[in-house]
Image (cartoon, rainbow, N blue to C red):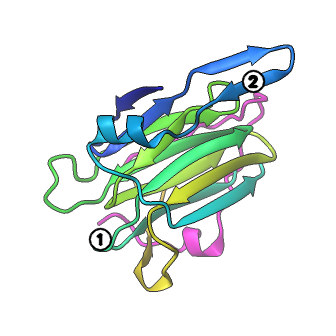
Amino acid sequence: MEFRELAVPGAWVITPRQFGDERGMFCESFKASEFEKVTGRPFDLRQVNCSVSAAGVLRGIHYTEDPPGQAKYVTCVRGAFLDVVVDLRPGSPTYGRWDSVVLDDVDRRSMFLSEGLGHAILSLADHSTVTYLCSIEYTPEFDRDMDAFDPRLGIEWPKVGLDGRPLTYIRSPKDAAAPPFS
């Protein structure tokens, strides 16, 4: 596994080694000993979520009030997503900064996001599927949202999908009504 910390400290992209032959492919998507060696922390799994999205579906920016915060380990198992992380930790030197990585079913990268970081995904193809390993169970009273199109954040969302067709952004009513970064 190869780990690379993103421009937002506490967020890593993890690229597994893939082993393929005529039968298909195998890779280790998560390995606790490697994860702990690089990040300096354990990952305590409490909930696993799976989401399937049409091209253009934008989920987020979501985060969990910190404390308790929720860490996530995100993997695309089908299709492709632009995965965006935003630093929402007050006092952080990178507060308000964002970074992004394409997660897909080709390179099979994952993204780890520490507590206090915001998260959004944009589906780049129909039927794209992502799994989230979460450090705490969903607790609605700590769940928060932020407008993914807030100009103060300046996130550069792709305008075309993997098939080259223009993307029409589709958000839930909750995400569309989310407050701005400020």
How would you classify the magenta stretch by its main secondary structure?
loop
Residue positioned most to the front? 33
In terms of image quadrants, where is residue 146?
bottom left
Q: Position of residue 128 (x, y in %)?
A: 74, 45
Q: Is residue 7 visible to us here?
A: no
Q: Is residue 163 visible to us here?
A: yes
Q: Which residue is mark 1?
A: 66
Q: Residue at position x 28%, y 73% from top?
A: 67
* Mark 2 secondary-structure assignment: strand
In the image, 84: left or right of 123?
Answer: left
Q: Quadrant of the C terminus?
A: bottom left
Q: Residue at position x 34%, y 63% from top?
A: 181
Residue positioned most to the top? 21
Neighbourhood count class around disc 2 (C-alpha, 10 Å): few under 14, some 14–19, many 20 upward: few
Q: Nearer the viewer, residue 172 or 71?
A: 71
* Mark 1 secondary-structure assignment: loop
Q: Amino acid at mark 1?
A: Asp
Circle count: 2
Q: Is residue 180 magenta?
A: yes
